[in-house]
Amino acid sequence: MKVLAFAASNSNKSINKTLIHYAVKQLPSNIEVETLDINDYELPIYSVDLEQAHGIPSSVDRFLAKIAEADLLLISYAEHNANYTVAYKNLFDWATRKNMEVYQNKPIIMLSTSPGEGGANNVLSMAINSAPFFGGSVLGSLSVPSYYENFDNETNELINPDLAAQLKELLHTISARK
Ligand SMILES: Cc1cc2nc3c(=O)[nH]c(=O)nc-3n(C[C@H](O)[C@H](O)[C@H](O)COP(=O)(O)O)c2cc1C
């Protein structure tokens, strides 16, 4: 079982990256995990004209290859104006130009968090609802609201016991699939 984990944010101080790191730490040590940073797949803003003139950049192949190598994806979505961050949308759009089934029939656990009470639920719902169009099969999801109240940035722990229990249960579906 190989898990590919990443946050759909290009922020160096991303709270979704922190949540992903916490979630990864909860997984049993016999599960292989690779965590990627979408900053390592920087691309020009998608344009039909650019694609026609220069084709699809090689970082798109590198990103799709990482997904292809994985048995399961663990993604935490940051929300900008009820949507994906520009960085992830751009990477995703480029990726669809190579393969509409970006998620390549992998099971996915989807997370999200934001400082607000909504917990980035808009983007999470959108990602869940659209996943089948992109070859994604969502096993489960969790939105963590009010990040700074529920997560301790000093200890890097989810300190809300209910949310921690929900995440633990969700992650158990990974070890149960081995
Ligand atoms: C341009 C912009 C738009 C945002 N829109 C939303 C929003 O629609 N909903 C929300 O919950 N938070 C919103 N936020 C706050 C983000 O949730 C917050 O910046 C969070 O840290 C982003 O996740 P990240 O740290 O993983 O990148 C927005 C932030 C920015 C900069």
Image (spheres, rainbow, N blue to C red):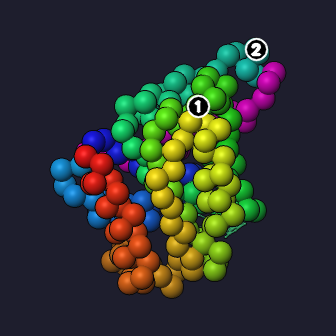
Spatial separation of the CA atoms under disc 2 and disc 1: 24 Å
The location of residue 50, given as percent across then percent down, is: 76, 22
Left or right: 127, with 67 as reference point: right
**Residue tagged by mark 2?**
53
The residue type indicated by label 2 comes to Ala
Q: Residue at x 30, y 41 (%)?
A: 2
Per the image, label 2 sits on a secondary structure element best described as helix
- Could you tell me if residue 18 is visible in this image? no
Q: Which residues are magenta?
A: 32-49
Asked if residue 37 is among those painted magenta in the image, a careful observer would answer: yes
The residue type indicated by label 1 comes to Glu
Q: Residue at x 60, y 72 (%)?
A: 119
Q: Is residue 155 above or below residue 136?
A: below
Residue sitting farthest toward the left: 30
Q: Is residue 79 above or below residue 51?
A: below
Determine contact: label 2, label 1, CB under 8 Å: no
Q: Earlier in the sequence, mark 2 or mark 1?
A: 2
Q: Is residue 94 above or below residue 2?
A: above
- Number of residue marks: 2
**Residue tagged by mark 1?**
101
Viewer-nearest residue: 91 or 178: 178
